[in-house]
Amino acid sequence: MGLNRLEELLKKKGIGPEGSKSLQDIELNEVEPLLKDNTYSLTTRATLITALLMLPPSEAEKNWLEKLKNEFRKLLPADLHFMIRHEEATSDFEKYLCSTLAGTDLSYTQAGDAMKFILGDESVPAFQKGAFLEAQRLKRESFDENKAFFDTLWDHTDRLQTELPVLIDICDNYDGFNRYYNLAPFIAALIASCGYPCLIHGIDAVAPKFGVTSSRVIEKGNGRTKRTHQSVLENLQDSSIGWAYIDQSVFHPRLHNLTTIRKEMVKRPFLATFEKMMQPVRASKGNYILTGFTHAHYRTEVAEQLKNQNKAAAAIVIKGLEGSSCPPLNRETIQILVNKDGITDRTIQPIAFLREEHTQLPFKSVDADQTYTAGLAALRGIRNDSFYQMLYYAGMALSDFGLLTKEKSMAYAEENLLNGKAYRHFQKGLN
């Protein structure tokens, strides 16, 4: 999905504390008329101002910001004036945004209130919500803020509590994959074929990547993606299926309604960290969660939040492909295990699970057709890279959660790929 010029400038500047680039004089000169141009989204304009105010400026940016602060009434739409002159903030949400712009952490209660405004209060304009999400990201959310955001999202989730003793829950980023195959639907069927129900969830498409999502892979097989909770549970309870997909539009419509804001703010908000951990269908004692991270900041943050929340039976957090829970085939990676005994941080290697070493290079791009073809071939017993990726993932999940020994998990998974059992589970689960 192409970006307009303002979104391009925001993407360059608004990445984050470690990855941002400075805007040059010529680009800053471009910015000025765009900020008053109502053909551009006010959310994008507010988010760019947020990035310029909060990230370390270059000399050119410092001079431009000085001009902005002196002439903001001329350079900015009136709706954005309070972002420069904080004493002009009137609503509670505007004050929360200004505090965040100033680098001040909100209390647990304030952060929870802010999240409620974002989810449900139509009196708060979209641009303020986008600016707040960006400001929190650039400030770095505190532990208490993250806890409040998580708790509020959790409380607004339409969740089906079940009596399932075990439910494995693949919690990957909802914006999908652009450089590797998204094999989650096939992995879910493989795990289910080994006797353990497996849930996946997501959205059709969302910023910033607009990548290949589980929803789009399932649709390539003419599968249903808008199932009710009850339909999902029926699939999970059926021993000949054992896997299911549930869409965010079904279990968290308020969060789903933020997709336009997320597109117009361009960069990934903290919502992406927590929306995938809502357990929309939940086992009797919580799900066995598999999730991933990319940036070092989240290595401990995600694990500590999961431990503190105490809503999962156990969790595995992986530094995986494109920030997913899928460990790379060609190198060791970080795995963090969260369970009743605490948090264990270690490395895992594919050679500990697979007999052969593998080369794995990213694609320049991938689409749902390619992903579906590769995943289906693996389920039919073709020993392609996807076959070994799925085998590694299933063996790691089942053994490291302590559900099966490594030897049994690998033997069952490989047998079910070769004898067509996993394929049958997948096909029946599409209906």
Image: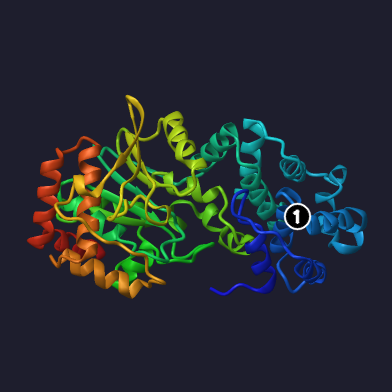
Relative placement, left or right, of 202 versus 350 is: right
Q: Is residue 129 above or below residue 86?
A: below
**Residue 321 in picture, x, y percent from top left:** 37, 55
Q: Nearer the viewer, residue 403 or 158?
A: 403
**Residue 105 in picture, x, y percent from top left:** 68, 35
Residue 387 visible in this rendered orientation of the protein: yes
Which image quarter is the C terminus in?
A: bottom left
Q: Secondary structure at mark 1?
A: loop
Relative placement, left or right, of 293 versus 223 is: right
Please name the residue shown 50% across and 51% down the image: 272
**Displayed quadrant of residue 336:** top left
What colour scheme has been applied to the protein in the rendered image? rainbow
Q: Amino acid at mark 1?
A: Ser
**Residue 275 in picture, x, y percent from top left:** 48, 48
Please name the residue shown 79% across and 57% down the image: 61
Q: Is residue 295 above or below residue 189?
A: above
Please name the residue shown 67% across and 52% down the image: 129
Q: Is residue 9 above or below residue 300?
A: below
Residue furthest to the top: 341
**Residue 23 in picture, x, y percent from top left:** 72, 63
**Displayed quadrant of residue 339:** top left
Q: Which residue is mark 1?
A: 58
